[in-house]
Amino acid sequence: MNFVTEEPQIESLPASDRRAMGRASVAAVFTGGTIAVSANTKSTVVPVLSGREILDRVPEIAQYLPSLKVQVHDFAMLPGPHMSPEMMLTLAGFLRATCMDDGSSTEHMDGIVVTHGTDSMEECAYFLDLVSNTDGPIVFTGSMHPSTDAAWDGGRNLVDALAVAASEEFRGVGTVVVMNGLVHAANEVTKMHTMRTDTFHSADFGPLGTVSTLALDEPRRNRNPRNRTHIPLSEDAELPYVELLLTYSGMDDSLFIAALKAGARGIVIEAMGQGNVPPGVVNGISRAREMEIPVVITSRCLSGPVRPYYAYEGAGRELEKLGCIFAPYLTGPKARIKLMVALAAGMDKEQIRGLWAG
């Protein structure tokens, strides 16, 4: 992949001194998504705008954040569904090499903004939260409407994301998603509606904070993220095949057997309710556990914990006896990302089980 990077003009002062002087520096990394779409016909609704072209459409950045220095990077031009875990790993390496404050980059940024397609934003944000170790926040944002739409929300979201990335208020929180005036923790946020601009919610615990730059309301943090995990991962790590299966009434073990035959090194199940599966699924889970393949249990419900509560066939207590791992307050797609990263990091079965404790 080729990266196009604008030459930075960053002051050599330490980040803390720059912020104290109101001269924060933020890297803006553009990956595509609806925020990069410029179209007024259905036949051409694809990402085409570069980072500089997007910034040129948002004069409010200079108006409301006049002292902010923005370093622009064009990483990719991807629709949200085209972002893969392998691409996420490449993105993590790119951020580490160019703009993180962990001592490995040549230019230390106070924060990073990543524009991204909303369909896979929560997965990519969570991947970065797991593998990155930086004090400055990594802020994901995007748009539900293209820039040619009268309802375009990308400009406001981008201004707010830059403000959060530059703010002392959100240092140390890891990766967050900023959309529609709210700041969400990467491990808690989920896209809930296919079209609405208020689509992103943290259903169990609520947002970390708020921001409304165009209303002169500075970023505010109300709480800290819950249950964050850091898993160091090398850039040349190989991400294994981990399957995600959604349970449904009358489901049998055929999809589990197919995944095992295809070489799955882990299985994540979006179970029913608090962590229960149809009886026909149990044989597939038993096969996976006999092969010492980790099986992680989440829920297809949009909120609430999973736990080994019921004791009937296929219920949580039986799954616990089989050695399944329960992943409370984590969606299936994110549990898959976490298990994939843990396996790529070479963790053994006890280390992997420990990742989900608490």
Image: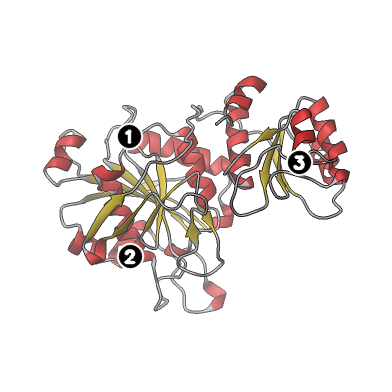
Expressed as whole percent of the image width and height from the top left, the position of residue 68 reads 20, 51
The answer to whether residue 63 is visible is: yes
Q: Residue furthest left?
A: 21
Q: Nearer the viewer, mark 2 or mark 3?
A: 3
What residue type is disc 2 on?
Answer: Arg
Expressed as whole percent of the image width and height from the top left, the position of residue 158 reads 34, 59
Expressed as whole percent of the image width and height from the top left, the position of residue 265 reads 72, 31
In terms of depth relative to the viewer, which is nearer, 197 or 146?
A: 197
What residue type is disc 1 on?
Answer: Asp
The numbered mark at residue 135 is 1
Q: Which residue is mark 3?
A: 310
Residue 58, by quadrant, is: bottom left
Up/down of 134 relative to 36, above or below: above
Q: Which residue is mark 2?
A: 156
Up/down of 162 relative to 286, above or below: below
Mark 3, other Cα within 10 Å: few <14 / some 14–19 / many ≥20: some
Residue located 11% across and 43% down the image = 21
In terms of depth relative to the viewer, which is nearer, 152 or 314?
A: 314
Mark 1, other Cα within 10 Å: few <14 / some 14–19 / many ≥20: some
Up/down of 234 relative to 57, above or below: above
Expressed as whole percent of the image width and height from the top left, the position of residue 100 reads 34, 35
**Marks 3,1: beta carbons within 8 A:** no
State left or right for residue 343 relative to residue 164: right
Q: Quadrant of the C terminus?
A: top right
Q: Marks 3 and 1, how far apart in space? A: 42 Å
Q: Nearer the viewer, mark 3 or mark 1?
A: 3
* Secondary structure at numbered mark 2: helix
